[in-house]
Image (tube, grey):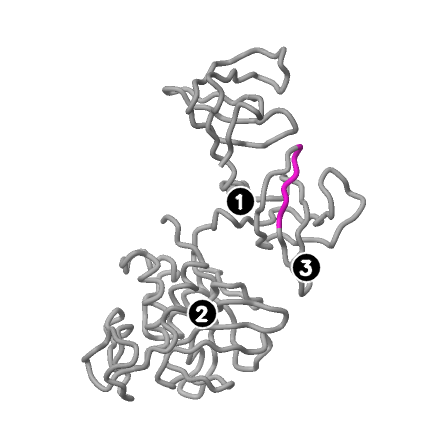
Amino acid sequence: MSKYYAEKAIKIAKAEKGYIEKASNKNLNSKKANPGSNNFTKYGVITGTNGDYWCASFICWVMYKLCGGSKTTAKKLLCGAFSAACETIRTAFVQKKRYFKSPRAGDLVFFSGSRHSGANHIGIVTKVSGNKIYTMEGNTNNSSSVVDNGGSVCEKSYSAAHSRILGYGRPLYDQDPDKTTITTKCRLYKSAMTVKGYYGSLPVGREVEFIKDKGNGWSQVRAKMVNALKTGFVKNTCLKKSGLSKYRTGTITAPTADIHEKNKKTSKVQVTAPKGSKVTVVSVGKQWTNIKYKRGMKTYDGFIYNKELSIR
């Protein structure tokens, strides 16, 4: 899978706001035309259940669109469940151990109801702010309560402790290149290269926004601390490496650049790379950048001067 990010799923869901179910199978792609109360929607077409309750079909449709029209890939993101039944989807997430009590943007939220046991309604979490969640839901209305047969796509909000919230399923999204995950419990420091002042601790599994590599083993990140976002610094050893991908492509800008074994001018030169060569950036220091450079079948791991490199 490639580039199946939570933020893209949220954007797709939000674009459907205002869609109204149809009286028949006509004008399914129009948001407002042929209004009715017979549960006909373009979402139900995707799950093969048009004319039935469609909140889960809406979620499947969002994932289907996120995956470029591939039901097979969308089903993988949904832990193997591509269904109009909310409880079927919830069970799949429970079995795959992708079911949580604390929400994250992009999660699926499952609600209890009166029709049957388990989940009767479903939505996608678009934002978490303090003890409040914001959602996009199909087959609901603008009421402040949980509505599982309301006829339209609406944006809603609830207390994260709402009595009808059963839990949250986390689809198997790709890691956003601007996001990374804390792999070792660490502190979010106020300044890089110092441990004197900090905002608080970041637990294992906490998702943070990667801003840039500050060199000398430190990265600048934006993280949620209690109810506020804080911009600070963590040691690179605390981060999942994929989070550095935004800053890991470099281009040689000097006519030629020597790739040294160590970050010293006197160290052995492994190979010389011409202008325009692409390299993978491992870390950035004050004068030297640690890179990987592939030539033919061999990959060189070494150092070049910062001034000889442009990092994207």
Cα gap from disc 3 to disc 1, whole angstroms: 19 Å
In the current view of this chain or complex, which residue is farthest to the left?
26
Which label is found at residue 243?
A: 1
Place of residue 279 in the rendered image (x, y in percent of width and height, measured from the top left): 46, 28
Q: Which residue position is annotated with label 2?
A: 124
Name which residue lies at 29% across and 72% down.
43
Cα gap from disc 2 to disc 1, whole angstroms: 24 Å
Give the mark nearest the N terminus, 3 or 2. 2
Q: Residues within 10 Å of mark 2 (few under 14, many from 20)?
A: many
Contact between labelled residues 1 and 3, with CB atoms less than 8 Å apart: no
Q: Is residue 228 left or right of residue 100?
A: right
Cα gap from disc 3 to disc 2, whole angstroms: 23 Å
Give the residue type at disc 3. Met
Query: Would you say residue 158 sits in the magenta stretch?
Result: no
Q: Residues within 10 Å of mark 1 (few under 14, many from 20)?
A: many
Picture quadrant where residue 128 is located: bottom right
Give the residue type at disc 2. Ile
- Report the label total: 3
Which label is found at residue 263?
A: none
Picture quadrant where residue 48 is located: bottom left
Place of residue 124 in the rendered image (x, y in percent of width and height, measured from the top left): 45, 69
Q: Is residue 171 left or right of residue 159?
A: left
Q: Is residue 197 left or right of residue 208?
A: right
Which label is found at residue 225?
A: 3
* Residue range corresponding to the magenta coloring: 216-221
Name which residue lies at 45% across and 59% down.
7
Give the mark nearest the N terminus, 2 or 1. 2
Give the mark nearest the N terminus, 3 or 1. 3
Give the residue type at disc 1. Gly
Viewer-nearest residue: 285 or 262: 285
Place of residue 85 in the rendered image (x, y in percent of width and height, measured from the top left): 35, 75
